[in-house]
Amino acid sequence: MGFDRNTVIGFALLAVLFMGYFWYVSSNQQAVTELKKRQEDSIAALKPKVDTAQWKADSVRMAQMRDSVSAGAFAAAGSRDSLVVVENDVIKASFSSKGGWVRAVELKKFAGPNGKPVQMGGTADESFGYAINTLPGQSTESNKLYFGQVAVSNNADSSKTVAFTASSATNTSITHKFTIRPGDYRIKAEIVLNGANQLVSNQTLNLQWTTVAHRQQADAEYEKTQTRLVYQTEGEYDYTSAMQGASEALELPAQWFGLKQQFFNSTILSAQPLKAVKADVVVPVEGKDSNTVATMKMTAQASLAAGATATVPLELYYGPNDYQVLKAYDNGMHNIVDLGSGVFAFVKWINRWLILPVFDFLGSTMGGYGGWTILLLTIFIRLLIVPLTYSSYLSGAKMKALRPEIDAMKARLNGDQQAISMEQMKLFREAGVNPLGGCIPALFQIPIFFALYSFFNSNIDMRGIPFLWASDLSSYDSVLNMGFTIPFYGAHVSLFTITATITSLLISIYSMSTTPDTGNPMMKYMPYIFPFMMLFIFNKLPSALTWYYTVSNVITLILQFVIQNYVINHDKILAQIAANKAKPKKQSKWQERLASMQEAQQKMEEMKKKQGKK
């Protein structure tokens, strides 16, 4: 391949950057997990061991009595929970008369790990409510009330509306109205308070929302690493990683706020930005509650207009992190799809403007997304960077042509590294060879490397798609479950990771066979370190990504052989180097300064040697 020392440095830098990114998304996770486990074990040890059916029944009965008392003037509204189901072509929403709110949402077009449609919500831990005054000096939460009046209607625009109303003995009432539109994952929600000046103090509705991100992927632990608090304030999107638990208190009002997991999110949107938003996320300790990825508890304030009747317009989103779906809403939610974030946020523009449009075009052309679409995308990307690839190989060929002279120089200078470095720079200058010629093209490919890492981690079109031996391209492929865990590797064997590692190793072996020996043992073995690291880093990554790297590496090997043997004219390169040597050389100011520094350093080394002899 003819890579020079700087090419090797480029690949080494690529390895270091990837290690840094991987460390960035997973740092301290093990320590935090162990701390949480110790805390939970300590709490569990202090709890009484009583957990009988009678005790549970008594607890439920006492809670119902407390709720009935606190309901005050609303106590006669009812005491029976009933469900109302409303659906369109993409979601099936269940509403509960207790609290008059969404109980669960089923996503019809997506299947969970159990093969059934993805369900968001539906557990006893989830709730939405706000404080209301039920009698003078007495209050309760809306989610504890029973909304006894239920009305379902079909609208002229094919949307469906369900309204829950709770009326009090003091002529006040609360209505929760929900509208589901065709083909829309959003649920339009309205809170209507009749007698708002009596029900709410200070014209402020204090909202409380608890939502649970259920496990939707085969690897729940990896899914946790992709979970975040997401929100938008004053038109600016931001997030907080929830991997180790998180707390957030927003200084600015939020247009929307939600909990995002790898491929789905639950979000509340408000036409009038919510104030004083605070949220806490709890992530279960590894090995406990494997069906829960994270639980978020949020509080916020909604301002009410003055008057006896007040309305709070909201929207609820329960759906996929699909870039095109969210982009169509034109409210900034498309930023939830992680196409590049943190220190690598710049790569999102590569994904949005290049990778995603090309991938969508290829998918629509082939009638679906899958491994063959990834193969075509890989070929497209490699064709796109052919000029960089050719430039790198050409630089390597020039360095290879100079290899005999460099070897002779090293023998003549008897291992004097300072003198060898100066003579090499002089030789490169006379031959017209840029020592960075192989390194710079490799560095330009780094943004594409990280762009694809983000793309395959977040592209929902890969979810549930089988290919070859992989059952799901959005998760790792496993050809062997070992039954035990190897530190930093895992408990399974990913075959695509092995193929990516082997092909990377073959590239390194071919590269080093044609690269001049720098005399530095570390540089000699550095190209072999990255393929070995890939074996551990890539084992839990989506098989779409490891399949891409396998294909990309195979193409690289083919290009190496074809360009080196059939495209690059080595005789012409030798003639060009000879012609460059014959030309008069004019040093740039930078080259003059570099030569001056090297000469000064060489003189210092000579003086030290003379002093040592004395």
Image (cartoon, helix red, strand yellow):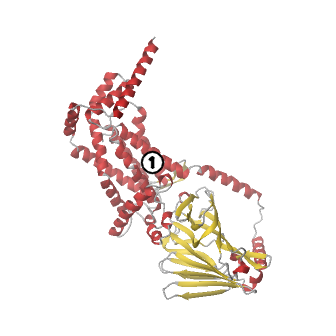
Is 393 above or below relative to 86? Answer: above
Q: Position of residue 142 (x, y in %)?
A: 69, 77
The residue drawn where x is 75% and y is 66% is 51
Front in this rendered view, residue 261 or 206: 206
Q: Which residue lies at the image location 27% right of the left edge and 46% below the top edge?
A: 561
Seen from the viewer's position, the closer of residues 320 and 507 is 320
Residue furthest toward the top?
A: 614
> Where is residue 252 shown, x and y percent of the image?
60, 63
Relative to 42, 338 lies left or right: left
Residue closer to the observer: 27 or 278: 278
Can residue 250 be seen here? Answer: no
* Residue occupying the point 64% across, 72% down: 302
Write down the quadrant of residue 52 in the picture. Answer: bottom right
Please say if 581 is above or below 497: above
Looking at the rendered structure, the number of numbered marks drawn on it comes to: 1
Q: In which quadrant is the N terminus drawn?
A: top left
Q: Which residue is mark 1?
A: 534
Under mark 1, the amino acid is Met
Residue 45 appears in the rendering: yes
Residue 76 is drawn in which quadrant? bottom right
Measuring from the top left, give residue 388's x and y in whole percent. 31, 48
Classify residue 155 as left or right of residue 431.
Answer: right
Label 1 neighbour load within 10 Å: few <14, some 14-19, many 20+ = many
Q: Is residue 233 left or right of residue 409?
A: right
Outermost residue on the right side: it is 137
Q: Residue 108, percent across and down?
A: 49, 75
Using the image, determine if residue 328 lies above or below residue 21.
Answer: below
Q: Secondary structure at mark 1?
A: helix
